[in-house]
Image: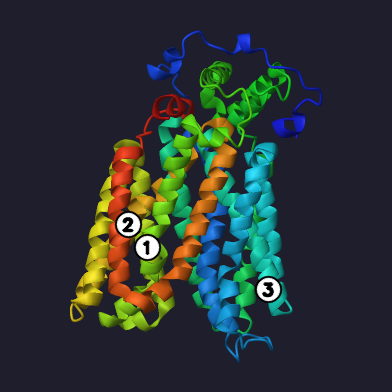
Amino acid sequence: MASDPEQSAPASFGKVDKSSTEIGDVDEPLLNGIHGSENYSVLSSILPFLFPALGGLLYGYDIGATSCATISIESATLSGVSWYNLSSVEIGLITSGSLYGALIGSVLAFKIADFLGRRRELISAAVLYLVGAVVTGVAPNFAVMVIGRFIYGIGIGLAMHAAPMYIAETSPTQIRGRLISLKEFFIVLGMVGGYGIGSLLVDIVAGWRYMYVASTPLALIMGIGMWWLPASPRWILLCAIQGKGNMEEFKESAVRCLCRLRGTAIGDTALAQVDEILAELSSVGEEKDVTIGEMFRGKCLKALVIGGGLVLFQQITGQPSVLYYAASIFQSAGFSAASDATRVSILLGLLKLIMTGIAVLVVDKLGRRPLLLGGVSGMVISLFLLGSYYLFLDNAAAVAVIALLLYVGCYQLSFGPIGWLMISEVFPLRLRGRGLSIAVLVNFGANALVTFAFSPLEALVGAGIVFYGFGVIAVASLVFIFFIVPETKGLTLEEIEARCL
């Protein structure tokens, strides 16, 4: 397409004329907060958010659908295959195959993200989603099914890496927090959709095949949509100031992309906004590619500490383990639906949707830190209540139910959406591709660690002590948030780099 800057980038590379983009005083555009207002229309912001967010929805759908697919595939009468008698290890490979793939996808993103750009990485993720779903759905044997799960997981790793970057770099500052948080809403929406579709197909012969193939239309829409969308203007300008092309041609591409992203509301201010971004990028030293050594020094190290710390605490405060106990907690409380794990999952999924929706509505008004501090404080209370239930309050099932709902609600107000939002904001542009890949790797790695370590720890010390341990970690995360995590509400990405790092 003529408007695709990734295809129109010049073949002959020239050096960037720094004098045309540098500013005399770093403080002027950034530290004093003087930057032009961003004109945009809400309608023009929908598609640049929607197509990348489908990557999150497909991730969530996989979580929900797989919980039902494992029930279907183990049934002698409903699996539709002769290899239904799977061991616990084989079921574990089906369940966690996409997680292993996501870990590999995160490692791949470290190498290819800045070369491909955000748009092409998301197109690649959509292709992997499509191929993985089809291979899994038509698998003639267990080995092929695991390969399909692994391919799908690589797509998850790339999508969860590139989607927050693309949304952050293309969204208007005024609604950036709301849109990135809304991506978490799409993940939860996908989970609820996966549970719902799975519950409808679980009693059909070979229903697990339909559960996985059902995601292919969304993968196609995502791929076609990302092909149609323009590249990130900030990524184009980063390439420009790093001397990877002709400055004027890259500026023209960035202006075209910005006009497509903002619609007619941008008027004739696109060029001025591009010049402003270029000046700010130059002022914070984005001219050179980041080296491995630089990633662990100065502002790059601080960004890694903030982003990596948030996604680490997001997982090691027990989110996978608390949900593991959901069905048994509801059953002990006497709810009739407690015996049906799918219904319990749908119920919790709806609560997640509601609380994430609240976070989306208030994040750009209240800010990131208040939601993190308030939500994690609620998680601390709920974890100590859960620990007390399993140690001292056996007959007070209502306490466990309240603690479970409080934990889920507070998590979705805080770590759930805000963790992904912050890692998409805090990394300097030239570090953003590699930094975010490290953060996503930490996220999936910590998730795997908590998931695999929980059962042995429970057998060793008991569920109550484990939940108390999660509570202590949650207290530590509060200290980390209070002293380390900055407020980024209302700041451009370049201002965040100048002020907060």
Local secondary structure at mark 1 = loop
Colouring? rainbow
Give the residue type at disc 1.
Gly
Q: Position of residue 51 (x, y in %)?
A: 58, 47
Report the residue marked by disc 1: 318
* Type of amino acid at the residue the image marks with label 3: Met
Query: From this viewpoint, is residue 466 visible?
Result: yes
Residue 145 image label: 3
Residue 463, image x, y percentages: 32, 74
Mark 3 is surrounded, within 10 Å at the Cα level, by few (under 14), some (14 to 19) or many (20 or more) other residues, namely many
Dot 2 and dot 1 residues touching (CB under 8 Å): yes
Q: Is residue 131 above or below residue 498?
A: below
The residue singled out by tag 2 in the image is 473
Q: Position of residue 281 (x, y in %)?
A: 54, 22
Mark 1 Cα-neighbour bin, 10 Å: few <14, some 14–19, many ≥20: many
Mark 2 or 1, which is nearer the eye? Answer: 2
Mark 3, mark 1: which one is toward the viewer?
1
Q: Give the vertical position of 501 relative to 203 (above or below).
A: above
Q: In which quadrant of the rendered view does residue 231 lie?
A: top right
The label shown at residue 472 is none
3D distance between C-alphas at marks 2 and 1: 9 Å
> Which residue is nearer to you in this view: 6 or 26?
26
Q: Nearer the viewer, residue 348 or 115?
A: 115
Image x and y of residue 438, in percent: 55, 46
Q: Earlier in the sequence, mark 2 or mark 1?
A: 1
Q: Secondary structure at mark 2?
A: helix
Count the marks: 3
Residue in the image at 27% along x and 53% along y: 475
Is residue 232 shown left or right of residue 296? Answer: right
